Image: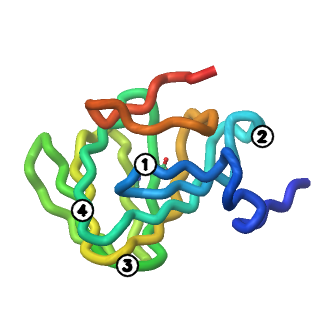
Amino acid sequence: MKVVKLEDVLGTEQEVDDGNWVSRRLILKKDNMGYSVHDTIIRAGTETHIWYQNHLESVYCIEGEGEVETLSDNKVHPIKADTLYALDEHDEHMLRAKTDMRMVCVFNPPVSGREVHDENGVYPADVD
Ligand code: 9YT
């Protein structure tokens, strides 16, 4: 069994800062769980274009407030603590944070660790 504490990954390669967000990656591909788990802070006042064409992601908000707009239908979904959204159709979306938002994110397939969004908001299929 493994026990991972947030403090174990802070300041290491498993903490990735993309400007609009900082992702603390607790479980990664190398852990062979079939998914990755991230504790991510989305910074207040930011807007991020995201389109995970190669991954499914569930995002559980545990602190803060913002919204997700799905770009196929321009629907705006308010997100606050205790709300989960699942990108079950590789949904292209805009994520807007009103306050700092703390999100627990699960990716399938797992990310390898250093991924940041490309110009289209995509993570590559595999960076290994
Ligand atoms: C909620 C979201 O998708 N934020 C972007 C960062 C990503 N979740 C990550 O790598 O932790």
Quick check: 63 above or below 8?
below
Contact between marks 4 and 2 (CB within 8 A): the answer is no
* Residue 7 at x, y percent in the picture: 74, 67
For the point 55% across and 49% down, the residue is: 16
Residue 3 sits in quarter:
bottom right
Which colouring convention does the figure follow?
A: rainbow
| SS for callout 3 | loop
* Residue 84 at x, y percent in the picture: 41, 65
* Residue 105 at x, y percent in the picture: 51, 55
Identify residue for label 4.
96
Residue 75 sits in quarter:
bottom left
Q: Give me the C-alpha separation between circle 1 and circle 2.
A: 23 Å
Looking at the rendered structure, the kind of residue marked 1 is Asp
Mark sitting earlier along the chain (4/1): 1
Q: Quadrant of the N terminus?
A: bottom right
Identify residue for label 2.
31
Q: Residues within 10 Å of mark 2 (few under 14, many from 20)?
A: few
Residue 11 sits in quarter:
bottom right
Marker disc for residue 64: 3
Q: Give me the C-alpha separation between circle 4 and circle 1.
A: 15 Å
**Depth check: 20 or 84 in front?**
20
Identify residue for label 1.
18
Quick check: 91 above or below 63?
above
Q: Is mark 1 within 8 Å of ligand 1?
A: yes
| SS for callout 2 | helix
Q: Give me the C-alpha separation between circle 3 and circle 4.
A: 11 Å
| SS for callout 1 | loop
